[in-house]
Amino acid sequence: MMRAWSLRRRMMLMFCAVVGVLLTGCFAGLYILLSREVHTQLDRQLLEAARPVISDLVTDPADEDDVNQLNLPGEYFELVDSSGNILQRSKNLPAGVLDRGAIPWAGSRTVFWTLDQRGRDRLRLAVIPFRRGNQQELLVVATPTLTADRTLGTFRGIALVLLPLSLLVTALVSTWYVGKSLTPIATFTRHAERMTEQAANSNPQELWQPLPVTTPRDELSRLAETFNRLFDRVASSLGQLRQFVSDASHELRTPLSVLRGETELLLAEPREPKQYHEALRVMDNELKKLGRIVEGLFTLSMADAGQLRLASDPLYINEVLEAACVLLTPLAQTKQIAIERELNQDCPYLGDEVFLRQIFVIFLENAIKYSPQNTSIKVQLEATGRMVSIHFGDQGIGIPPEHHAHIFERFYRVEQPGYSEAKPGETPSGGLGLAIAHAIVRAMGGSIDCVSELGAGSVFTVHLPLHQ
C-alpha cells in the first residue's frame, strides 16, 4: 500500500514515525530516571530519619518506649524482633498497617519496599537490621509516597499532552520541509517532461533552459547541475544528430543524382564508345565517393560506440609514414607538390598499421588538396619520452580562425574562394576525413593539434602515446 503513495507522503510518514518513536523513548527514559531519582530521595530520607532512632536504641538498650513515643508527621516507625514480632510502634502508625506479612526480611541487608494499601496512601518502607545488645532487631521506617506519586503523575500528564502535540508539530514541520525539499525535484520533472514533449517538434537548442542552482554545495543543486550537463549534452547530441542526418543525406544525394543522371543518359539512346568511357569514369568517381562516405560513417559509428577494434602489432611508425608518403607521391606530382620528410629516426610502436596509414593518408591528401601548385609539404617525425608526434605542414590556403573549432566535425567544410572540391586525380573525401582521423587518434589515446594561418598554410600534429 505504501508503494502506491507519493514520495512526499512516504517521507512525511517515515519522518513522523521516527520522531514519534524517538520522543516516546525519550519521555519513557526521562520518566524512568525521574522515578528512580524520586525513590532514591525517599530512601535517603528514610535512612536519615532512622539513623538517630537506631543510635538511641543501641545506646540505651533498656529503654522500651523510645519508638512508642515517636509521633513525627509523615514518618512511621516500627521495631520488630528477629522472629517478626512487633516490639514497638510509633504513635502515629495505625494498627495493622505494617503487620508481619508486610515486612520483607533480607538478613543483615537493608531492604527498601513500596507497600500498596487498599483505600490508603502508598508507603515507602526501609527495613534496617541492627543489633541491640545481643539481639538482632529490625527498624521499619515508612513514609507516604503521595508527593512523589503526584510528581510522577504530573510528569505523565505533561508527557501525554506534549507527545501528541510534538507529533502534530512534527507532522506540520515535516510536511512543510518535505514539500520545500521536493520542489526542485518537481521542477526537474516538469522541465524534463517539457523537453521530452518539445524535442520531437522543436530545435533542442531553442527549448533548452538550464535548471536553477541555488546552493552549489546542496545535493539538489548538484543534481540540478548534473541535469543541466545531461540536458546540454542531449540537446547538443540531438542537434548534431539532426545536422549529421541532414549533411549525410545531402552528401549521398549528390553522387546518387549524378549516377542516376549518367545511367539515364546512357540508356536513352546508343552512344559512342568514347561517351560510354566518359560516363563510366564519372560513375566510377561518384561510386568511390559513395564508398568512402559509407566506410567513413561505419568507422565513425564504431568509434562512437567504443567498438573500434585496434590491433596491437609491433611496427615502426616511420616506415608506415614513409609508405603513406610514397602512396600519395603520384597525386602530389600532378600538382608539382614535393613531399619533404624527415623520418631518419626509427620509432618502434605497438598499434594498428591499417588505421595508422589511414590517418597519415588523410592528412597528406588534405595537404595536397588545399595546397597550390609548385609548393611543398613537410612531414616530420619526433619521438620524445613516452609520446611520438607527427607533423604535417603545408603551404596552402590556411584555415580562418573562426573555423578552427569545427574542422573535426563531420561533413564540415571551410568554403574558400578559388578552391574547388573536385580536382583531377583527387578522390573526394565526402567531408569526413578529419572527423575519421580524429576518432581513430582518440581511440588510440592520442590527440591532434592544428596551427593555421590564413594564406600561409597549416600544420597538423598527431600525438600518439608510446607503449613501453
Image (cartoon, rainbow, N blue to C red):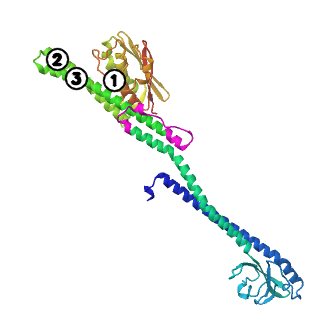
Q: Residue 257, which numbered label?
A: 3
Question: Alpha carbon of mark 1 to alpha carbon of mark 3: how far?
Answer: 18 Å
**Residue closest to the eye, 461 or 276:** 276
**Residue closest to the eye, 174 or 140:** 174
Looking at the image, is 19 positioned above or below residue 150?
A: above
At x 88% / y 81%, what residue is drawn? 56
Nearest to viewer (mark 1 / mark 3): 3
- Residue kind at label 3, given as amino acid type: Ser
Nearest to viewer (mark 2 / mark 1): 1
Question: Where is residue 3 drawn, in percent x and y?
Answer: 44, 56
Residue 311 in sight from this viewpoint: no
Q: Are marks 1 and 3 in contact (CB under 8 Å)?
A: no
**Residue closest to the eye, 109 or 276:** 109
- Residue kind at label 1, given as amino acid type: Gly
Residues in magenta, as a range? 197-225
Task: Say which residue label 2 marks.
Answer: 277
Task: Say which residue label 1 marks.
Answer: 431
* Mark closest to the chain's N terminus, 2 or 3: 3
Question: Where is residue 464 drawn, in percent x and y?
Answer: 44, 28
